[in-house]
Image (cartoon, rainbow, N blue to C red):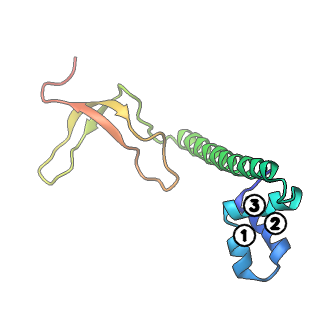
Amino acid sequence: MEASKLHRQKFCKGIYGVYTAGVKKCTKLYNYCEQCCDQVIPKQERILNYACWVGCINESKSSAKRAAEAKLAEAELMAQLAGTYVPVQGDKVDFKPDGENSFFMPAKVKEVVSGSISSDNCPMKTRFRYGSGGFP
């Protein structure tokens, strides 16, 4: 059972119509799953109703996670197509620490902390290894 935000809103508008407070309450994930399962399985069947409710919540959360991963993969692909630099562990870079009296120094990317490029074009978080003697 799909339960994206848009699907939940459409379902709840079908039940509550123009009653916006009811629609707003119904579109919350737990309330939506309870509404759906109560329509399909009577409340007297507590075990089946609960299993339906838990399945609805788990499927909704995994669906949201898959959608976020797809969006992230698309952002990474667009960054590659645009020629944006994506740091990789071991890359040699010029690193400038924060502060007014800092200057660029040679460094290697020790590890990429954040998983990928974010959708709001914030730079990726990385950890660097640097020193004054250069690198072999």
Residue at 80% x, 73% y is 13
Tell me: residue 120, above or below residue 23: above
Counting residues from the start of the chain, the first of labels 1 and 2 encountered is 2
- Numbered disc total: 3
| Quarter where residue 111 is shown | top left
Along the horizontal axis of the image, is 135 left or right of 65? left
Q: Amino acid at mark 3?
A: Glu
On the image, numbered disc 3 is attached to which residue? 34
Q: Callout 2 environment at 10 Å: few (<14), some (14 to 19), or many (20+)?
A: some
Q: CA distance from mark 1 to mark 2?
A: 9 Å
The residues bearing labels 1 and 3 have C-alpha atoms spaced at a distance of: 9 Å
Q: Residue at x 88, y 57 (%)?
A: 40
Q: Position of residue 117 (x, y in %)?
A: 48, 45
Q: Residue 56, relative to residue 14: is it above or below?
A: above
Q: Are the residues at dot 1 and dot 3 in contact (C-beta closer than 8 Å)?
A: no
Say which label, 3 or 2, has the lower sequence index.
2
Residue at image mark 2: 11
Q: Is residue 136 above or below residue 99?
A: above
Question: Disc 1 vs disc 2: which is toward the camera?
Answer: 1
Q: Mark 1–mark 2 contact, CB under 8 Å?
A: yes
Q: Nearer the viewer, residue 66 or 135?
A: 66
| Mark number displayed over residue 26 | 1
Q: Residue furthest top?
A: 136
The front one of 16 and 102 is: 16
Numbered disc 2: secondary structure: helix
Mark 3 to mark 2: distance in Å? 13 Å
Indicate the amino acid at tag 1. Answer: Cys
Q: Position of residue 61 (x, y in %)?
A: 65, 49
The residue drawn where x is 53% and y is 43% is 79
